[in-house]
Image (cartoon, rainbow, N blue to C red):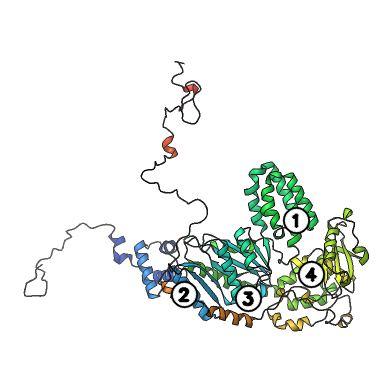
Amino acid sequence: MSKPHNSDFIHITFMDLEHNHKILADNARFVTTFRKFNQSILNEIERAVVYRRCDAYTIRNLLQPLYPNQLFLTQDLSNAIQKIKHEKQITGSDTSQLLKFLLEQQKEEPMMFVQPLINVDSNRLCGIFWMTANQIILWSRYSDVVLHDNTSRTNKYNFPLSLFILVDNDGKSRLGAQAFLNDETQESYEWILQQTLDVTGIEPKVIITDMDPAMDVACQTTYSNAYHVHCIWHMAQNLPKRLKNKLGTTDFKEFIHDFWKTRNSLCVEVFEQRFQTLLNKFPNGNDYLHDPIYLTQHSWVRAFTSRVFTAGMQSTQRIESINSIIHKVVSSSSTMANVAEALDSRMQKEEMNKSFIAWKYQSTMYYQPFVVENFFSNINSIIQKYLFPQIVEEIHKQMCESVLYRCEMLDIEDAFKFDEDQLDQNEISENQAMTNVPKESIKEVWQIISYLVPNSYQHVIILNDGTHLCTCLLLVSHGIICRHYFKLMIENLNALFHILLMPTRWLQDDAWNQIDLISNKPFIGTSSKNLKSTSSFDPRIYPIPKHHNNIQEVEVRHHTQKKTSDGHVYNVNDIEDPIKRQGKGRPSIKRLKACNEQRGIDKASKENVYHEDDNSSGRKCRLCHKTGHYAPKCPNKENI
């Protein structure tokens, strides 16, 4: 080759047509031309990056089985991912991606609430709370019972994911609110609880949590009027950790049996007696049993929790189920934006499942037609019209079980007379129910006795306003009319039914718009009575008890828009990612030692080392009193 000075072109003077360098066999694999991705592979990568937010490692694992003959190098995947992100404008930090995702949703749904917590000095995200528009509506209807728990290992910053779970009118779990927290302290819990009040203005009537002391204090300060219930599953996990070593294995098994028997006491007097027996029988565990177990008795003893509406829940198991679903999608290496998208996908599936369940129960019959249609046909037509199918099914079960009981009427004066020395647990329950009701408001007192177990019975108190109280407390704790009252309706003309004897939370979505019309409907009896006999009852004489206020969605909407407009102005792209939070417990690796510290020796290097130090701890030879061998193989055995 040559290039003359007076020319801009390079001239080829001689060409050798034979190869004069070594040909590499791997050229066919690693040359850029053969490593290019075709359009179908690029489409799969784009789908994984845009919709799944997957990294190069995950994308390789997804594509390699689909394209076994294609070579997926990390640098090629990284280049393709970065090119797609640049074209789709998927740039910025994890925090900015999270905020952009949530704020885009907020533009489509003005009711949505997003509240980030940003450190002013470092401009880093310290926490974030958000509720979608649908979650705000769900909170306004079903926040009478709220479950809360944290789940870990959902993001690479080790921020706990805080979830609020509601139970809708079909008895299904629904995400009510969510937040990322910097830590699990009282201040963090108070912040997220206050956010729910700022968004909706509604304080839950009952909140179920684990036994976290920080959350207990936060509920007392922020949800001051809410009834706090402790999860019995978390309590069952804590008891072995705190008491098994103190009591021993044998005594601990006996203690667990007695403890749960004490916890399941339905009467306060019985609980006090059993708990005192527990203290006397197992004195080594009195410190933990007194504080915090006994001091928080109203949060876990069934004698107290059965007297508040909990929708039948005693634990946070609903949250644990959702946690398992979330952990199938995200991991400890996921970004916060990945978690937010996973939660959004979960909420969409909840809406789809609700529609499917509604269709399923409309096309299928689960109850026994003979009992329901012959005794409760009038009631059945009303509950099927206004209640969700899942709740209707639960009521049908109670109707069918009512045929297993008989009724006996008691004199009101005799019902108020008690001999405390001869009371059993059923009579103590009646005593507590009677003491909570004024005597002049009681119309009748009935005893409902089981045919199968004659010693098992409940008491039903009919009040003058048309309502009733049963000592089984199913209506109070579950919001469902019990089988004992349905049996009494067959036998007694004064036992009447109204749809609003049960909480309004079980009403269908369309029935909320007819709440005034429903409340003006008269009480009715069973199908064995003439409906005309109930038409003479004046609703003004028998006022309908409304268990929960119907929060108008319009009021919630205006309140939410005002709250979102009061937020701070910030540039989303300038907010930096949070610092990785150190979790609880010992670090996963030991600390690094300084140069002047003696480094430890692992066990493997110690196995074959013989030490002549007589002061070394461990077993020694009984002949020469040295370590490293025993008497049968002592080298000095002949000299001793």
Left or right of 394, for residue 555: left
**Label 4, label 1: how far apart the Cα atoms are:** 22 Å
Q: Mark 1 or mark 3: name the one nearer the start of the chain.
A: 3
Q: Give the amino acid type for the residue marked by disc 2 in the picture.
A: Lys
C-beta proximity under 8 Å, tags 2 and 1: no
Q: Which residue is mark 3?
A: 201
**In this picture, is 544 found above or below 125?**
below
Q: Position of residue 369 (x, y in %)?
A: 80, 71
On the image, which quarter does residue 525 sit in? bottom right
The amino acid type of the residue labelled 4 equals Ile
Check disc 2: other Cα within 10 Å, few if <14, some if 14-19, many if 20+.
some
Q: Earlier in the sequence, mark 2 or mark 3?
A: 2
| Tag of residue 424 | none
Indicate the quadrant containing the N terminus: top left, top right, bottom left or bottom right: bottom left
Q: Which residue is mark 4?
A: 481
Q: What residue is pinned by disc 2?
A: 100
Query: Three-letter amino acid code at disc 1?
Result: Asn
Residue 349 appears in the figure:
no
Query: Which amino acid, mark 3?
Result: Gly
Q: In this orientation, which residue lies closer to the viewer: 90 or 290? A: 290
Q: Which residue is mark 1?
A: 264
Where is residue 124 drawn, in percent x and y?
Answer: 44, 67
Q: Secondary structure at mark 3?
A: loop
